Image (spheres, rainbow, N blue to C red):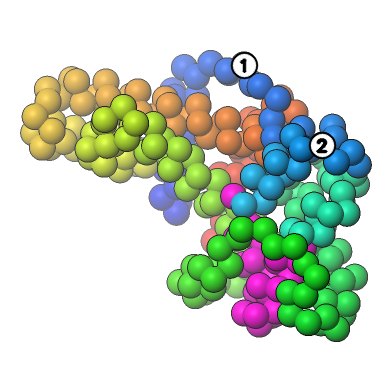
């Protein structure tokens, strides 16, 4: 695995060549799309799960549009509540089946059409709340480095980083459940950087393992990371066949300055 210019994990040519595409179950986003305007529990649960995972990129986008902290919190919460209530996913076909594209387009329209209505209401009044950690959003936003990107570019970068963090947490959870938390803590820095530059001997010494065994463990870690990354991307797309294209887009977004 190689690294992009910002240090985010990427794929080396050799790693990509040895990876075999898994068989995907129906994705969360495809469940939502197929549901259309029907109010099925399965579809609503799938959409709520996606919203809870990826709300922060939209919050950052709204803040980037020069809305205040409180207004951004209100707008983000109201957007997701109305997304669920009004079945806006029935309009998602034109968005190429990508959850990130659908969300950004829908939020842009929401800010244009609903902002005045929301301001006229009592803050939070009449809006069923989703369990979004909006109070932590501003803390995260305040630690973001300053740059000259557009709100749309900012959203895409936050989306990409959120996706990578979600994958990393899933991987950490798997190792913890197997009683290998210490191994993961030691090896997860090897997910970035060139293989030739990894301190395998130092890692082996710290873990009390043979250097060859460490290399095998790193190979397995990277392989599982790639699998989970593809699965997570697949959860936000209608067609799993587009995952390679979405991967290229994700790393292109991370490489931008």
| Residue 240: x %, y % from top left | 69, 26
| Residue 141: x %, y % from top left | 53, 71
Residue 101 lies left or right of residue 59; in this view the side is right
Name the residue at 70% across, 41% down. 45
At label 2, counting other C-alpha atoms closer than 10 Å, the crowd grade (few under 14, some 14-19, many 20 or more) is few
| Residue 217: x %, y % from top left | 27, 24
Name the residue at 65% across, 80% down. 70
- For the stretch drawn in magenta, the main secondary structure is helix
Q: Which of the numbered marks, if any, corresponds to residue 49?
A: none
Which image quarter: residue 107? bottom right
Quadrant including the N terminus: top left
Report whether residue 190 is seen. no
The residue segment tinted magenta is: 53-79
Which image quarter: residue 123? bottom right
Residue 93 lies left or right of residue 145; in this view the side is right
Q: Secondary structure at mark 2?
A: loop
Residue 185 in magenta stretch: no
Between 150 and 204, the one nearer to me in the picture: 204
At label 1, counting other C-alpha atoms closer than 10 Å, the crowd grade (few under 14, some 14-19, many 20 or more) is few
Between 182 and 162, the one nearer to me in the picture: 182
Compared to 221, does 54 lie above or below? below
Between 192 and 75, the one nearer to me in the picture: 75
Residue 76 in magenta stretch: yes
Dot in front, 2 or 1: 2
Q: Which of the numbered marks, if any, corresponds to residue 23?
A: 1
| For the residues bearing labels 2 and 1, Cβ distance under 8 angstroms | no
Quadrant including the C terminus: bottom right
Q: Secondary structure at mark 1?
A: loop
Label located before the other in sequence (2 or 1)? 1
In whole angstroms, how far apart are the C-alphas of marks 2 and 1? 25 Å
Q: Which of the numbered marks, if any, corresponds to residue 40?
A: 2
Name the residue at 70% across, 66% down. 76
């Amino acid at each position: 695995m190689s690294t992009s210019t910002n240090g985010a994990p990427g794929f080396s040519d050799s790693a990509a060549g040895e990876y075999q595409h898994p068989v995907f179950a129906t994705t969360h986003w495809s469940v939502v799309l197929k549901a259309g305007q029907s109010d099925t529990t399965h579809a609503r649960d799938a959409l709520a799960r996606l919203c809870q995972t990826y709300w922060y990129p939209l919050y950052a986008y709204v803040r980037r549009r020069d809305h205040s902290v409180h207004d951004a919190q209100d707008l983000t919460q109201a957007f997701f509540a109305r997304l669920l209530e009004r079945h806006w996913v029935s309009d998602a076909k034109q968005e190429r089946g990508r959850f990130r594209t659908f969300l950004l387009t829908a939020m842009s329209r929401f800010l244009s059409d609903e902002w005045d209505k929301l301001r006229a209401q009592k803050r939070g009044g009449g809006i069923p709340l989703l369990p979004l950690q909006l109070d932590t959003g501003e803390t995260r936003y305040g630690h973001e480095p300053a740059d000259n990107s557009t709100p749309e570019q900012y959203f895409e970068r936050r989306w990409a980083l959120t996706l990578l963090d979600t994958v990393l947490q899933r991987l950490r959870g798997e190792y913890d459940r197997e009683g290998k938390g210490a191994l993961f803590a030691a090896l997860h820095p090897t997910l970035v950087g060139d293989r030739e530059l990894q301190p395998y001997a130092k890692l082996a010494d710290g873990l009390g393992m043979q250097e060859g065994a460490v290399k095998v463990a790193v190979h397995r870690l990277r392989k599982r990371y790639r699998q989970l990354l593809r699965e997570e991307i697949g959860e936000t797309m209608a067609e799993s066949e587009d995952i390679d294209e979405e991967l290229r887009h994700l790393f292109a977004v991370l490489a931008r300055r």
